[in-house]
């Protein structure tokens, strides 16, 4: 799964740069949210203090959840190397919790 998601990440990086003019964590998260919306998936991003919770509901099965877990894990590792995100994987839902700081505002991008 890691190899597959690693092959996709360069294309994702190009998409983020095209959409936002730069490549950073906020841009990646915004791109994921916008892509999910365009694809008819439900993505939620909640902030509680410095903890950010993400949930994606999809119809891609367990393979899709495992794929997204790998993509998100690599993305978090790239931008927040010392982080330890917590993932929950189900057939139609993937969720993650990670500390990204309390000053992070998803609407200021």
Image (cartoon, rainbow, N blue to C red):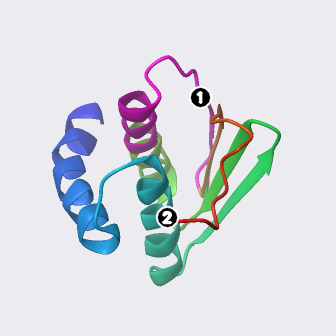
Q: Earlier in the sequence, mark 1 or mark 2?
A: 2
- Which residue is identified by label 1? 85
Membership of 23 in magenta stretch: no
Foreground residue among 101 and 67: 101
Residue in the picture at 38% in, 49% down:
24
Residue 25 versus residue 16 in the image, above or below: above
Residue in the picture at 26% in, 58% down:
12
Tag 1, which secondary structure? loop
Residue in the picture at 67% in, 56% down:
105
Q: Which mark is residue 30?
A: 2
Foreground residue among 6 and 90: 6
Please report the bounds of the magenta region as a residue range: 71-91
Residue 3 versus residue 26 in the image, above or below: above
Circle 1 Cα neighbour tier, 10 Å, few/some/many (<14 / 14–19 / ≥20): some
- Image check: 91 left or right of 102? left
Which numbered disc, 1 or 2, marks the residue closer to the eye? 2
Residue 81 versus residue 6 in the image, above or below: above
Residue in the picture at 77% in, 49% down:
47
């Amino acid at each position: 799964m890691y190899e597959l998601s690693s092959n996709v990440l360069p294309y994702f990086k190009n998409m983020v740069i095209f959409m936002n003019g730069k490549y950073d964590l906020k841009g990646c998260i915004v791109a994921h949210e916008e892509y999910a919306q365009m694809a008819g998936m439900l993505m939620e991003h909640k902030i509680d203090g410095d903890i950010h919770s993400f949930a994606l509901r999809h119809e891609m099965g367990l393979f899709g959840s495992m794929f997204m877990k790998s993509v998100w894990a690599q993305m978090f590792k790239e931008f927040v190397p010392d982080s330890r995100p917590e993932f929950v994987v189900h057939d139609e839902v993937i969720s993650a919790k990670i500390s990204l700081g309390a000053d992070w505002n998803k609407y200021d991008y």
